[in-house]
Amino acid sequence: MKVAIVLGTRPEIIKMAPVVRECQKRGLEFFVLHTGQHYSYSMDKVFFEELELPGAKHNLEVGSGSHAVQTGKILAGAEKVFQQERPDVVLVQGDTNTVMASALAASKMGIRIGHVEAGLRSFDRTMPEEVNRVIADHISDYLFAPTVQALDYLREEGIVKGVHVTGNTIVDSVFQSREIARRKAKALEELGLKKDGYLLATAHRAENVDSKDRLSGMLRGMEMVSGDTGLPVVFPMHPRTQGRMKEFGLRSDAIRVIEPRGFLDFLQLESNARLVLTDSGGVQEETCILGVPCVTLRENTERPETLEVGSNVLVGTSPSRIRGGATVMLKASRGWKNPFGDGNASERMLDVLEASFEAPAVDAMGVASGEASRPSAM
Protein backbone atom coordinates (compact mmCIF):
# COMPACT_ATOMS: atom_id res chain seq x y z
CA MET A 1 0.00 0.00 0.00
CA LYS A 2 1.38 3.37 -1.07
CA VAL A 3 -0.11 6.41 0.68
CA ALA A 4 -0.22 10.00 -0.56
CA ILE A 5 -0.63 12.54 2.24
CA VAL A 6 -1.81 15.85 0.80
CA LEU A 7 -1.74 19.14 2.68
CA GLY A 8 -1.55 22.81 1.83
CA THR A 9 -2.08 24.86 4.98
CA ARG A 10 -0.44 24.95 8.38
CA PRO A 11 -3.48 23.51 10.21
CA GLU A 12 -3.33 20.55 7.82
CA ILE A 13 0.36 20.03 8.61
CA ILE A 14 -0.47 19.99 12.32
CA LYS A 15 -3.39 17.57 11.98
CA MET A 16 -1.65 15.24 9.53
CA ALA A 17 1.61 15.10 11.50
CA PRO A 18 0.42 12.10 13.58
CA VAL A 19 -0.58 10.26 10.38
CA VAL A 20 2.89 10.83 8.95
CA ARG A 21 4.47 9.56 12.16
CA GLU A 22 2.21 6.48 12.17
CA CYS A 23 3.18 5.69 8.56
CA GLN A 24 6.84 5.93 9.57
CA LYS A 25 6.26 3.74 12.61
CA ARG A 26 4.65 1.02 10.48
CA GLY A 27 7.23 1.23 7.71
CA LEU A 28 4.58 2.09 5.11
CA GLU A 29 5.46 3.55 1.74
CA PHE A 30 4.19 7.14 1.67
CA PHE A 31 4.97 10.61 0.40
CA VAL A 32 3.82 14.13 1.27
CA LEU A 33 2.41 16.49 -1.35
CA HIS A 34 2.37 20.16 -0.31
CA THR A 35 0.14 22.35 -2.48
CA GLY A 36 1.31 25.69 -1.11
CA GLN A 37 -2.27 26.94 -0.72
CA HIS A 38 -1.52 29.44 2.05
CA TYR A 39 2.24 29.63 2.03
CA SER A 40 5.07 28.30 -0.09
CA TYR A 41 6.70 25.12 1.11
CA SER A 42 9.85 27.13 1.83
CA MET A 43 7.88 29.20 4.35
CA ASP A 44 6.22 26.11 5.82
CA LYS A 45 9.51 24.23 6.22
CA VAL A 46 9.80 25.62 9.74
CA PHE A 47 6.58 23.78 10.66
CA PHE A 48 7.96 20.47 9.36
CA GLU A 49 11.22 21.03 11.19
CA GLU A 50 9.53 22.20 14.39
CA LEU A 51 7.28 19.14 14.47
CA GLU A 52 10.21 16.88 13.53
CA LEU A 53 8.58 15.65 10.31
CA PRO A 54 10.12 14.56 7.00
CA GLY A 55 9.81 17.17 4.29
CA ALA A 56 7.35 17.21 1.40
CA LYS A 57 8.43 15.25 -1.66
CA HIS A 58 6.30 17.32 -4.04
CA ASN A 59 5.50 21.05 -3.91
CA LEU A 60 2.88 22.64 -6.14
CA GLU A 61 3.48 26.23 -4.92
CA VAL A 62 0.01 27.30 -6.09
CA GLY A 63 -0.04 30.44 -3.93
CA SER A 64 -2.99 32.74 -3.46
CA GLY A 65 -5.71 33.52 -5.98
CA SER A 66 -9.44 33.27 -6.43
CA HIS A 67 -11.10 30.03 -5.36
CA ALA A 68 -11.45 28.96 -8.99
CA VAL A 69 -7.84 29.73 -9.90
CA GLN A 70 -6.44 28.11 -6.77
CA THR A 71 -8.64 25.03 -7.08
CA GLY A 72 -7.76 24.63 -10.76
CA LYS A 73 -4.02 24.78 -10.08
CA ILE A 74 -4.26 22.21 -7.30
CA LEU A 75 -6.45 19.91 -9.40
CA ALA A 76 -4.01 19.93 -12.30
CA GLY A 77 -0.91 19.73 -10.13
CA ALA A 78 -2.21 16.91 -7.96
CA GLU A 79 -3.23 14.91 -11.01
CA LYS A 80 0.30 15.16 -12.41
CA VAL A 81 1.84 14.00 -9.12
CA PHE A 82 -0.62 11.12 -8.79
CA GLN A 83 0.13 10.01 -12.34
CA GLN A 84 3.83 9.96 -11.49
CA GLU A 85 3.57 8.33 -8.05
CA ARG A 86 0.56 6.02 -8.52
CA PRO A 87 -0.53 5.94 -4.86
CA ASP A 88 -3.07 3.37 -3.72
CA VAL A 89 -4.84 5.85 -1.46
CA VAL A 90 -4.84 9.63 -1.10
CA LEU A 91 -5.37 11.10 2.37
CA VAL A 92 -6.74 14.62 2.75
CA GLN A 93 -7.71 16.47 5.92
CA GLY A 94 -10.39 19.03 6.64
CA ASP A 95 -12.13 21.53 4.40
CA THR A 96 -9.69 23.57 2.30
CA ASN A 97 -9.42 24.01 -1.45
CA THR A 98 -6.48 21.59 -1.20
CA VAL A 99 -8.80 18.92 0.19
CA MET A 100 -11.54 19.34 -2.37
CA ALA A 101 -9.28 19.67 -5.43
CA SER A 102 -6.86 16.86 -4.60
CA ALA A 103 -9.73 14.54 -3.66
CA LEU A 104 -11.44 15.34 -6.95
CA ALA A 105 -8.24 14.64 -8.87
CA ALA A 106 -7.87 11.26 -7.15
CA SER A 107 -11.53 10.43 -7.75
CA LYS A 108 -11.24 11.12 -11.50
CA MET A 109 -8.22 8.80 -11.62
CA GLY A 110 -9.90 5.96 -9.73
CA ILE A 111 -7.62 6.29 -6.69
CA ARG A 112 -9.16 5.62 -3.29
CA ILE A 113 -9.61 8.65 -1.05
CA GLY A 114 -9.50 8.89 2.73
CA HIS A 115 -11.03 12.02 4.25
CA VAL A 116 -9.62 12.78 7.68
CA GLU A 117 -12.08 14.77 9.81
CA ALA A 118 -15.10 13.78 7.72
CA GLY A 119 -18.66 14.71 8.62
CA LEU A 120 -18.14 18.18 10.06
CA ARG A 121 -20.96 20.59 9.21
CA SER A 122 -21.65 24.25 9.94
CA PHE A 123 -24.76 24.15 7.70
CA ASP A 124 -23.69 27.47 6.21
CA ARG A 125 -23.11 27.07 2.47
CA THR A 126 -21.88 30.68 2.21
CA MET A 127 -18.64 29.40 3.77
CA PRO A 128 -16.26 27.95 1.14
CA GLU A 129 -15.08 25.46 3.74
CA GLU A 130 -18.56 23.96 4.04
CA VAL A 131 -18.75 23.36 0.29
CA ASN A 132 -15.29 21.80 0.26
CA ARG A 133 -15.99 19.37 3.09
CA VAL A 134 -19.34 18.27 1.67
CA ILE A 135 -17.82 17.54 -1.75
CA ALA A 136 -14.89 15.67 -0.21
CA ASP A 137 -17.20 13.52 1.91
CA HIS A 138 -19.37 12.53 -1.02
CA ILE A 139 -16.47 11.33 -3.18
CA SER A 140 -14.34 9.66 -0.49
CA ASP A 141 -13.98 5.92 0.04
CA TYR A 142 -12.89 6.12 3.68
CA LEU A 143 -14.56 8.71 5.88
CA PHE A 144 -12.76 9.12 9.19
CA ALA A 145 -15.36 10.83 11.36
CA PRO A 146 -13.91 12.39 14.53
CA THR A 147 -17.08 12.00 16.61
CA VAL A 148 -20.43 10.21 16.65
CA GLN A 149 -22.06 13.57 15.86
CA ALA A 150 -20.06 13.75 12.62
CA LEU A 151 -21.09 10.18 11.81
CA ASP A 152 -24.74 11.14 12.31
CA TYR A 153 -24.40 14.10 9.94
CA LEU A 154 -23.00 11.79 7.27
CA ARG A 155 -25.84 9.32 7.74
CA GLU A 156 -28.38 12.13 7.32
CA GLU A 157 -26.82 12.78 3.89
CA GLY A 158 -27.02 9.10 2.99
CA ILE A 159 -23.32 8.37 3.49
CA VAL A 160 -22.90 5.13 5.43
CA LYS A 161 -20.38 3.04 3.51
CA GLY A 162 -16.76 3.42 4.55
CA VAL A 163 -17.49 5.58 7.59
CA HIS A 164 -15.39 4.99 10.72
CA VAL A 165 -15.45 6.93 13.99
CA THR A 166 -11.78 7.28 14.88
CA GLY A 167 -11.44 10.39 17.02
CA ASN A 168 -9.72 13.51 15.74
CA THR A 169 -6.03 13.62 14.86
CA ILE A 170 -5.81 17.03 16.54
CA VAL A 171 -5.86 15.17 19.86
CA ASP A 172 -2.96 12.99 18.69
CA SER A 173 -1.16 16.10 17.51
CA VAL A 174 -1.72 18.10 20.70
CA PHE A 175 -0.53 15.21 22.88
CA GLN A 176 2.54 14.54 20.71
CA SER A 177 3.37 18.21 20.14
CA ARG A 178 2.99 19.09 23.81
CA GLU A 179 5.94 16.82 24.54
CA ILE A 180 8.01 18.54 21.83
CA ALA A 181 6.87 21.97 23.08
CA ARG A 182 8.18 21.24 26.55
CA ARG A 183 11.64 20.96 24.99
CA LYS A 184 11.44 23.73 22.40
CA ALA A 185 8.73 26.36 23.04
CA LYS A 186 9.86 29.67 24.54
CA ALA A 187 6.88 31.94 23.89
CA LEU A 188 5.97 32.67 27.52
CA GLU A 189 9.55 33.47 28.43
CA GLU A 190 10.16 35.64 25.38
CA LEU A 191 6.90 37.57 25.77
CA GLY A 192 7.14 37.91 29.55
CA LEU A 193 3.82 36.13 30.15
CA LYS A 194 2.65 33.98 33.04
CA LYS A 195 0.03 31.21 33.23
CA ASP A 196 -3.54 32.64 33.43
CA GLY A 197 -2.08 36.13 33.21
CA TYR A 198 -3.35 37.05 29.73
CA LEU A 199 -6.12 36.55 27.16
CA LEU A 200 -5.23 35.04 23.78
CA ALA A 201 -6.96 36.14 20.56
CA THR A 202 -6.89 35.02 16.93
CA ALA A 203 -8.94 36.06 13.88
CA HIS A 204 -8.41 35.23 10.25
CA ARG A 205 -11.72 34.27 8.59
CA ALA A 206 -12.51 36.38 5.52
CA GLU A 207 -16.11 37.00 6.58
CA ASN A 208 -14.80 38.59 9.78
CA VAL A 209 -11.58 40.39 8.94
CA ASP A 210 -12.65 41.64 5.50
CA SER A 211 -15.53 43.56 7.09
CA LYS A 212 -14.64 46.81 8.87
CA ASP A 213 -17.73 46.58 11.08
CA ARG A 214 -17.03 43.00 12.17
CA LEU A 215 -13.32 43.51 12.67
CA SER A 216 -13.82 46.69 14.68
CA GLY A 217 -16.54 44.92 16.70
CA MET A 218 -14.17 42.09 17.57
CA LEU A 219 -11.44 44.51 18.62
CA ARG A 220 -13.83 46.54 20.76
CA GLY A 221 -15.14 43.37 22.39
CA MET A 222 -11.59 42.26 23.18
CA GLU A 223 -10.86 45.67 24.70
CA MET A 224 -13.93 45.39 26.91
CA VAL A 225 -12.95 41.91 28.15
CA SER A 226 -9.43 43.17 28.84
CA GLY A 227 -10.86 46.09 30.83
CA ASP A 228 -13.17 43.81 32.84
CA THR A 229 -10.41 41.33 33.73
CA GLY A 230 -7.39 43.59 33.93
CA LEU A 231 -5.59 41.10 31.68
CA PRO A 232 -3.81 42.02 28.44
CA VAL A 233 -5.00 40.62 25.11
CA VAL A 234 -2.17 38.92 23.23
CA PHE A 235 -3.03 38.71 19.53
CA PRO A 236 -0.72 36.76 17.16
CA MET A 237 -2.10 38.52 14.11
CA HIS A 238 -2.50 36.75 10.78
CA PRO A 239 -1.02 38.72 7.82
CA ARG A 240 -4.50 39.01 6.31
CA THR A 241 -5.82 40.60 9.49
CA GLN A 242 -2.84 42.95 9.73
CA GLY A 243 -3.50 44.11 6.18
CA ARG A 244 -7.15 44.81 6.88
CA MET A 245 -6.32 46.69 10.09
CA LYS A 246 -4.16 49.09 8.08
CA GLU A 247 -6.68 49.34 5.26
CA PHE A 248 -9.54 50.18 7.64
CA GLY A 249 -7.46 52.49 9.81
CA LEU A 250 -8.06 50.42 12.95
CA ARG A 251 -5.78 50.21 15.99
CA SER A 252 -6.05 49.33 19.66
CA ASP A 253 -3.68 50.28 22.46
CA ALA A 254 -5.29 47.65 24.70
CA ILE A 255 -4.34 44.76 22.42
CA ARG A 256 -0.78 43.48 22.19
CA VAL A 257 -0.28 42.51 18.57
CA ILE A 258 2.54 40.04 17.95
CA GLU A 259 3.74 38.25 14.85
CA PRO A 260 2.28 34.77 14.21
CA ARG A 261 4.15 32.07 16.13
CA GLY A 262 5.01 28.52 15.22
CA PHE A 263 2.68 25.76 16.38
CA LEU A 264 4.74 24.80 19.42
CA ASP A 265 4.85 28.39 20.69
CA PHE A 266 1.17 28.86 19.94
CA LEU A 267 0.34 25.63 21.77
CA GLN A 268 2.20 26.98 24.78
CA LEU A 269 0.30 30.28 24.55
CA GLU A 270 -3.04 28.45 24.26
CA SER A 271 -2.46 26.07 27.14
CA ASN A 272 -1.47 28.86 29.54
CA ALA A 273 -4.10 31.49 28.59
CA ARG A 274 -6.91 32.43 30.96
CA LEU A 275 -9.32 32.62 28.02
CA VAL A 276 -9.10 32.36 24.22
CA LEU A 277 -11.13 34.46 21.76
CA THR A 278 -11.06 33.13 18.20
CA ASP A 279 -12.84 32.51 14.91
CA SER A 280 -10.77 29.39 14.19
CA GLY A 281 -12.31 25.93 14.14
CA GLY A 282 -9.00 24.30 15.01
CA VAL A 283 -8.48 26.56 18.01
CA GLN A 284 -11.94 25.62 19.29
CA GLU A 285 -10.79 21.99 19.28
CA GLU A 286 -7.38 22.67 20.77
CA THR A 287 -8.70 24.75 23.68
CA CYS A 288 -11.28 22.07 24.43
CA ILE A 289 -8.54 19.43 24.56
CA LEU A 290 -6.28 21.65 26.67
CA GLY A 291 -8.98 22.60 29.18
CA VAL A 292 -8.95 26.33 28.34
CA PRO A 293 -12.27 28.23 27.97
CA CYS A 294 -13.02 29.55 24.48
CA VAL A 295 -15.19 32.35 23.08
CA THR A 296 -15.84 31.89 19.36
CA LEU A 297 -16.32 35.01 17.25
CA ARG A 298 -18.78 33.38 14.85
CA GLU A 299 -22.51 32.68 14.66
CA ASN A 300 -22.05 28.98 13.88
CA THR A 301 -19.54 26.21 14.31
CA GLU A 302 -18.73 22.84 12.78
CA ARG A 303 -17.49 21.79 16.23
CA PRO A 304 -20.82 21.60 18.14
CA GLU A 305 -19.26 19.12 20.56
CA THR A 306 -17.38 22.03 22.16
CA LEU A 307 -20.68 23.76 22.90
CA GLU A 308 -22.22 20.59 24.27
CA VAL A 309 -19.41 19.92 26.77
CA GLY A 310 -19.26 23.56 27.84
CA SER A 311 -15.76 24.50 26.67
CA ASN A 312 -16.94 27.06 24.13
CA VAL A 313 -19.63 29.66 23.42
CA LEU A 314 -20.67 31.35 20.15
CA VAL A 315 -20.96 35.15 20.29
CA GLY A 316 -20.51 36.54 16.78
CA THR A 317 -18.71 39.88 16.49
CA SER A 318 -20.90 42.17 18.61
CA PRO A 319 -18.81 43.80 21.37
CA SER A 320 -21.53 43.34 24.00
CA ARG A 321 -21.99 39.67 23.13
CA ILE A 322 -18.23 39.08 23.19
CA ARG A 323 -18.11 40.67 26.63
CA GLY A 324 -21.06 38.60 27.85
CA GLY A 325 -19.67 35.37 26.46
CA ALA A 326 -16.30 36.00 28.08
CA THR A 327 -17.97 36.66 31.42
CA VAL A 328 -19.76 33.32 31.20
CA MET A 329 -16.69 31.34 30.14
CA LEU A 330 -14.41 32.91 32.75
CA LYS A 331 -16.75 31.51 35.39
CA ALA A 332 -17.07 28.10 33.72
CA SER A 333 -15.65 24.95 35.22
CA ARG A 334 -12.70 23.54 33.28
CA GLY A 335 -13.64 19.97 34.08
CA TRP A 336 -15.35 19.15 30.78
CA LYS A 337 -14.68 15.87 29.01
CA ASN A 338 -12.71 16.05 25.77
CA PRO A 339 -15.11 14.75 23.06
CA PHE A 340 -12.52 14.38 20.30
CA GLY A 341 -10.88 11.11 21.24
CA ASP A 342 -8.00 9.59 23.17
CA GLY A 343 -5.04 10.47 20.96
CA ASN A 344 -5.03 7.25 18.91
CA ALA A 345 -6.99 8.41 15.84
CA SER A 346 -4.09 8.03 13.41
CA GLU A 347 -3.56 4.43 14.53
CA ARG A 348 -7.22 3.60 13.90
CA MET A 349 -7.11 5.16 10.45
CA LEU A 350 -4.05 3.20 9.38
CA ASP A 351 -5.60 0.02 10.83
CA VAL A 352 -8.63 0.60 8.58
CA LEU A 353 -6.50 1.20 5.48
CA GLU A 354 -4.19 -1.76 6.03
CA ALA A 355 -7.11 -4.10 6.67
CA SER A 356 -8.87 -2.82 3.57
CA PHE A 357 -5.92 -3.44 1.27
CA GLU A 358 -5.22 -6.84 2.80
CA ALA A 359 -8.83 -7.97 2.30
CA PRO A 360 -10.60 -5.54 -0.06
CA ALA A 361 -13.73 -7.69 -0.31
CA VAL A 362 -14.38 -7.41 3.41
CA ASP A 363 -15.36 -4.25 5.28
CA ALA A 364 -12.28 -2.68 6.86
CA MET A 365 -13.62 -2.97 10.40
CA GLY A 366 -15.14 -6.41 9.98
CA VAL A 367 -18.75 -5.21 9.87
CA ALA A 368 -21.43 -5.68 7.25
CA SER A 369 -21.01 -3.76 4.00
CA GLY A 370 -22.52 -0.30 4.25
CA GLU A 371 -22.51 -0.23 8.04
CA ALA A 372 -20.56 2.53 9.76
CA SER A 373 -18.13 1.33 12.39
CA ARG A 374 -17.50 2.67 15.87
CA PRO A 375 -14.42 1.91 17.95
CA SER A 376 -15.00 0.12 21.22
CA ALA A 377 -13.13 2.85 23.07
CA MET A 378 -11.81 6.26 22.17
Image (cartoon, helix red, strand yellow):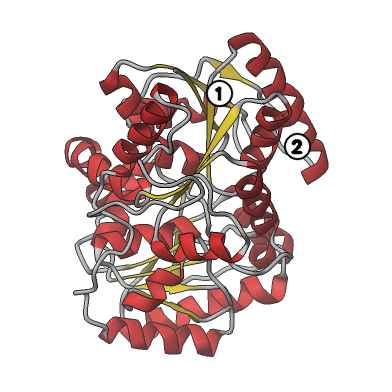
Relative to 234, residue 83 above or below = above
Report the amino acid beneath label 2.
Answer: Gln
Going by the picture, which residue comes out furthest to the top? 84
Report the residue at 71% width, 21% height from top.
Answer: 79
Closest to the observer, 89 or 117: 89
> x, y (%) of residue 104?
70, 35
> x, y (%) of residue 189?
22, 49
Residue that carries the numbered disc 2 in the rendered image: 70
Relative to 325, residue 154 above or below = above
Relative to 52, residue 323 above or below = below
Relative side of 206 to 279, left or right? right
Report the amino acid beneath label 1.
Answer: Leu
Q: CA distance from mark 2 to mark 1?
A: 16 Å
Closest to the observer, 130 or 290: 130
Relative to 71, residue 189 above or below = below
Q: Is residue 91 visible?
A: yes
The quarter of the picture where the N terminus appears is: top left
Report the residue at 29% width, 82% height from top.
Answer: 330
Residue that carries the numbered disc 1 in the rendered image: 33
> x, y (%) of residue 76?
76, 24
> x, y (%) of residue 61?
66, 25
Please tell me which of labels 2 and 1 falls first in the chain: 1
Determine the image quadrant of residue 350: top left
Report the residue at 26% width, 58% height from top.
Answer: 271
Name the mark on residue 94. Answer: none
Q: Is residue 191 visible?
A: no
The quarter of the picture where the C terminus appears is: bottom left
**Secondary element at tag 2:** helix
**Secondary element at tag 1:** strand
Can you tell which of label 2 and label 1 is closer to the viewer?
1
